[in-house]
Amino acid sequence: MKIFTMCMECQKELGHPSFEPIITDYYEEALAFIECSRGHKSAVLLQSQKFEILLESAANALIEGYTLEAASSLSSAYERFFEFAINVFCKKNKIPKKSIDETFKQVAKQSERQIGAFLFLHLLIFGRHYTLNKKIPELRNKVIHQGYIPTPNEVIDLGELIYQEILAITNLLSSELLNELQQVTMETVQGRNEKIPTDIPRATTTGTIFFSLGTTNRKETFQEALSSYTESREKLYGSMPYLRFFSKAVEIYAKLKKNI
Ligand SMILES: [Zn+2]
């Protein structure tokens, strides 16, 4: 996975951004370790939940034409979203993270068990049932199993169903359990922060832009989110030469200032 960032240590030193664009990789831990051209080493910590990262991964794969990978990421995002919702529900009852983790371990390998846990926790907390979209497993099984390579339109159809389910439940969590949702996000950030060596400076970013829990301005459909994300991606890559130019200008200005 890739993230665009700038060096925060340069910003602290210069009092303004260095404009040096840095595109760097991150993996399971959602931590990126960077080194800028001035030699600052630092870590960038993503605030995003796993399902948000997987949704963005699906969008990237789809834009680049890797439909099988896009469908697979969508399917994983759907599963990881239920894990996130279960965590939020458990926070409502003040269940310690250790107990949640111990329980989750026992359902971790079977997504049907996780969905079952979600449905009953939803019933318990809201006093009403939640009806899952029955079309998702049907389409998901067709696309995911037996190495079937879907067309872009088939991925978009699957993406739309999964996106609608995630959006509906996210809106519910944001309006009814916002405090608990924020606590889960905070715990994720704390857990990642502890994995960074103590002597390395760090900065936190909201992370993904395809879907973000950190905004209330979420796109209504998968298609809209995909168009908006494609546009942002193009703008970002288009701005690279200008950012490199500004970065060079900042460097020259800093040297001149030093010599005055
Ligand atoms: Zn720097």
Image (cartoon, rainbow, N blue to C red):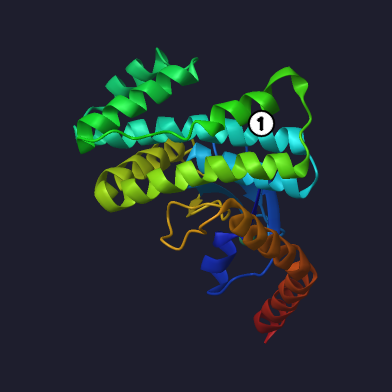
**Image spot of residue 93 (x, y percent):** 19, 32
Which quadrant would residue 27 be assigned to in this image? top right
Viewer-side residue, 117 vs 46? 117
Residue 198's place in the image compared with 253, above or below, is above
Q: Amino acid at mark 1?
A: Ser
Q: Residue at x 28, y 34 (%)?
A: 89
What residue is rendered at 56% in x and 51% in y?
208
**Residue at horizontal 58 percent and vertical 53 percent from the top:** 210
Q: Secondary structure at mark 1?
A: helix
Position of 52 with respect to 226 (left or right) is left
Nearest the camera: 6 or 163? 163
Give the image quadrant in which the ligand numbered 1 is located. bottom right
Q: Is residue 114 visible?
A: yes
Q: Quadrant of the N terminus?
A: top right
Q: From the viewer's perspective, is residue 182 above or below residue 236?
A: above
Quick one: 190 or 48, which is closer to the camera? 48
Q: Is residue 164 left or right of residue 97?
A: right
> Is residue 1 visible to us here?
no
Q: Is residue 219 left or right of residue 61?
A: left
**Front residue of this view, candidates 131 and 112:** 131
Q: Position of residue 54 (x, y in %)?
A: 59, 39
Q: Residue lying at the far bottom in this picture: please name it.
A: 260
Q: Which residue is mark 1?
A: 72
The image shows residue 203 at horizontal and vertical percentages of: 49, 53
